[in-house]
Amino acid sequence: MSLHSVFIVDDDAAVRDSLLMLLRGEGIRARGFASGVDFFSHLPEDATACVITDVRMPDMDGDEVVRRLSQMRGNAWPVIVITGHADVPMAVQMMKAGVVDFIEKPFDPRRLIETVRGCLARLNDVGHEQACRAAAELRLTRLTPRERQVFDALILGHSNKAIALNLDISPRTVEVFRAKVMTKMEADSLSALVRMGLALT
């Protein structure tokens, strides 16, 4: 069973059910929604997920679903669009909006599964990045105000001497604070600490 869910937004019950059967048969968690309005009214709380949406639907079309998801979840919720009414301008527009793939009906089940698996694999990377960021943010809260000042200065690339001058303390004291920062942030090198700091910006 996949770690992430796939949400299907399609007003055609037959298409929706066949997609659910196809994905679940591949061990992928899937859930269907009858419209964009239904989807956003019951928006799942998953941190990461993949969405498959039709384009032409009543009340809220696929284009609006893509725009709203991009604003709300960014690349943590990649979108695959399936449609029986594809045209080049529409495809280009939606790809620019962040759609991962644009699949025309009737679609090849193998291609769809391959695309979904690609999305889910990328989500594993996104999930890992989010977990690392959350852990770094938690460690950051453990720093004292002075340690935080030293941390911020190190991330900016300042030397011990420059930090000492700026904070009006001795270079030796900076070294002590720097060691504490490295320990509390669980960084085994300055480059690891800088990478952590850049990820938090």
Image (cartoon, grey):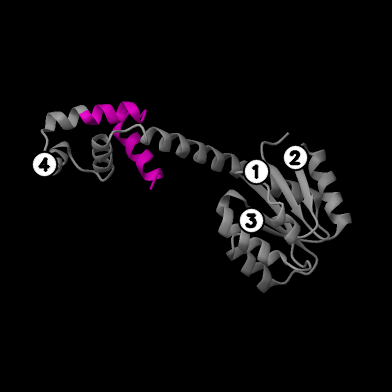
Name the secondary structure under disc 3.
loop
Q: Are marks 2 and 1 in contact (CB under 8 Å)?
A: yes
Name the secondary structure under disc 2.
loop
Question: Sequence-wise, which precedes: disc 2 or disc 4?
Answer: 2
Mark pair 1, 3: CA separation = 12 Å
In the image, which disc is placed on residue 100? 3
Tag 1: amino acid: Leu
Question: Sequence-wise, which precedes: disc 4 or disc 3?
Answer: 3
| Residue 70 magenta | no
Residue under label 4: 165
In the image, which disc is placed on residue 28? 2
Majority secondary structure of magenta residues: helix
Residue under label 1: 120
Question: Sequence-wise, which precedes: disc 4 or disc 1?
Answer: 1
Location of residue 199 in the rendering, given as x and y in whole percent from the top left corner? 41, 44
Tag 3: amino acid: Val
